[in-house]
Image (spheres, rainbow, N blue to C red):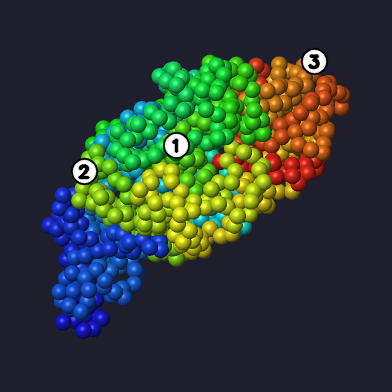
Amino acid sequence: MLKNTRLQMIVMMAISGFLGYAAASGKLDVFRRANADSPQPAVASKVGNPAGAAESTCCPQGTRKAQLLAMADPKVPAGRIDTGEAPDDQTSRAPGTPIQTAGVPGSPSAATTINGKQLPPPPPKFGGVIKESVKDSKPWWPPRVVPPKGAPNVLLIMTDDQGYGVSGTFGGVIPTPALDRIAKTGLRYTRFHSTSLCSPSRAALITGRNHHAVGFGVIAELSTGYPGYDAIIGPENATVGKILKDNGYATSWFGKNHNTPGAQYSVSGPFEQWPSGMGFQYFYGFMGGETDQWEPYLFQDHTQIFPWMGKPGYNLTTDMADEAIKHMMGLNAVAPEQPFFVYYVPGGSHSPHQPKKEWIDKFKGKFDMGWTELREQIFANQKRLGVIPTNTQLTAWPDDLPKWETLSADEKKLFARQAEVFAGYTAYTDHEIGRVIQAVEDMGKLDNTLIIYIDGDNGTSPEGTLLGTPNQYTAYNGVLDFPVKEQLKFYDAWGSAATYPHMAVAWSWAFDTPFKWTKQVASHFGGTRQGMAISWPARIKDTGGIRHQFHHFIDIVPTILEATGITAPEWVNGIKQKPIEGVSMAYTFDKANADAPSTRKTQYFEMISNRGIYNDGWYACTTPPVPPWVLNAKMPHVNEYKWELYNLNEDYSQANDLAAKMPEKLKEMQALFMQQAAKYQVLPLDNSQFQRAIEPRPSAVAGMTVFTYSGPMAGIPDGSAPHILNKSFTITAEVEVPEGGDGMIVTQGGRWGEYGLYLLKGKPVFNYNGLMLAQFRWEGEQPLAAGKHTIVFDFTYDGPGVAKGGSGVLRVDGQDVATKKIPRTIPFLLPVDETFDIGSDTRTPVNDKDYQVPFHFNGKIDKLTFKLGPSQLTKEDQRKVQDAVARAHD
């Protein structure tokens, strides 16, 4: 028996050396994986389990070394050895976990796994010999860090704004063959949950921690100065990208990034909360909540790019798939043995709904039956597929949404078209995802690739208003009743580059069948229940199986870590890590566990004070006091909300409220919610909806009233630009004009709204685009002669108040050349994915009849100055403005 620590350490070093040699020589596979049909026991490792949750097998620890030590000393339990070893080199590993090595130590081909407790791992000690002469010395190369042998590739896919009843895989009427493919070769999950809102769900997904615990209690645009709401994913919350990268994976991110605060979008950064700073070595995607799919606000790593220029028919949905495929093929060509982690998150089906025309055409007439019949069809399909229990009840239709049979013929025509375009966008997005999956198979890597396909980051969006809109920015700016007659003018163009559309709320409710409510509502499954499928052919043998265990977005990271054999780190960049709060779902991969109890026993939900709490089959939640599509409504105190109670074991769809019958059970659940809220930084509760957006936040331009620029400069984000809404302003451009002067001097916004100052065939023009509803234009009569000129646009706002009109004067060299009074201005915001451009227009034109992008100015801009008057908004007006801004960024 071993009775002193030194002897234990000697034995462990000997065993470790033997195992390392055996692994490198191929004589011993120390990480032989259990066959799915013959599962081997794993040593459980607690990974920050929430209250009441069972211990998970996330990040399983290798047991061979610990077993040998235990044989030497029966008093030492296998898998729980604490040797006191310090992680002083790259090959140190968590106690009980063997190291795998490959190649000749010190050679250029040497490779090793790491223990993963400390990331990045400490540099190894030099293992060669250094003498005075190189002839007497011996070189030594540090080994490359590689994942454990047999670790799978990981393809994590998530769509946007798709509720449980959208996809055909989960009973919807929209075919989703790529999701079907993953379900048929793997498993479908019927009780999987988001947070109900975009960036909070994404923060939970990539960190394995609750959204409040990583600062994303709500979207970044509503952040406040509390730990659960500051939109800061701190260094104590390393993402799965960082963990896998530092363990030897090639990591990349394609698509939407809504986890970088808006004030950090500029070239000045900081970049710690960009994908690169969160562990993703390559990023190709857009920043913020949404973007135009035809002319996107697109980045490659930190650089804004414009691949759509000069490419008729370009669409980001296809381009993104092309880029992901090209990237994976490049990795395969250069390092075919290196596993990859691809995070693939397209914008579909978030507004604007903009698929290619051939995808819209596939759904012509498919929604003429209306949303009432659509719900019935989805509900029947769900029962037939087994993705809802046979005793599930279809929840009641809300009184404040119209029934289809009450609509006029024009309304039915318009609304059916909206759904056709949404369906086309959804199917198109799934098709391109299918191309990415097929590329993995074409490379011969599908068998050992873990594919997780989540259908939506929240429920279907209600942000299109009760009528829908061909331009989402009309809704964002408070135009909530865009007349049906006017919308029908866009019928044929709906979904094209000439529109920025969203659909009526009633469709969103129907696409969340069988549940109540929609996106933004965290208390009910219409906002949080997502369909999901997982495949891993080398591991999952119960193909086509269905799993009904209750799980959450935070459970994905632990599942990936267990699948890859990688340990959750204790330290990252010298920062002690907060525990991962999710539990692994890998136990569900085995057919023997098809009906096993869920390892997630408890989970809270909260968004803008709509609350829910799950505990072992029971669910309590608040009743939303106001629908999310009603703006600026007065809210009750957070303690005055009505609560509901459901037994989910008997009531899958939250149809039968038991609160009145079981008041004591309800009190028990309410108390549990408060415990969880205190634990995970949910407090203080704030139901001010989007009004909290007026909270002051860090900004490089906060308080500035004079902005000065020189020379061309494009791509300045909205948060760093001068804001001219609801105030007087003066733009002064000192320019040098050639013969035939032409091009953009300065612009912000584009096709969907805002302004541009430019020369058109030599004539000075100031064009104000009123959300496509009206174009206001000031134009000089004569072209400018070659030479230096000073062009001024001076606007006097008719405030106080929001969206007032005003008088504008266009001057050249001190002479008035055009004067006009306009009846109204844009009240709240311009397109969030447009930029402030000087010397060109990099996105969409403010007036398509005048020019097309990039419309470079062919002269010289010596100096450009913006002088802003004070805001002429009341405090209530300011609240409305910020409300709209926040909704748009969502």
Residue nearest the observer in this picture, 3 or 224: 224
Residue nearest the observer in this picture, 827 or 272: 827
Residue ranking furthest to the left: 27
Q: CA distance from mark 3 to mark 2?
A: 76 Å
Q: Which residue is mark 2?
A: 542
x and y, in percent, of residue 767 in the image: 72, 24
Instruction: Locate residue 430 relative to residue 20 in the image: left or right.
Output: right
Residue at x 51% of width, y 23% of height:
405
Residue at x 40% of width, y 30% of height:
376
Q: Which residue is mark 1?
A: 512
Mark seen at residue 782? 3
Residue type at mark 2: give it: Asp
Residue ranking furthest to the front: 661
Q: Quadrant of residue 43?
A: bottom left
Instruction: Locate residue 83 relative to residue 870 in the image: left or right.
Output: left
Circle 3 SS class: loop
Quarter containing the C terminus:
top right
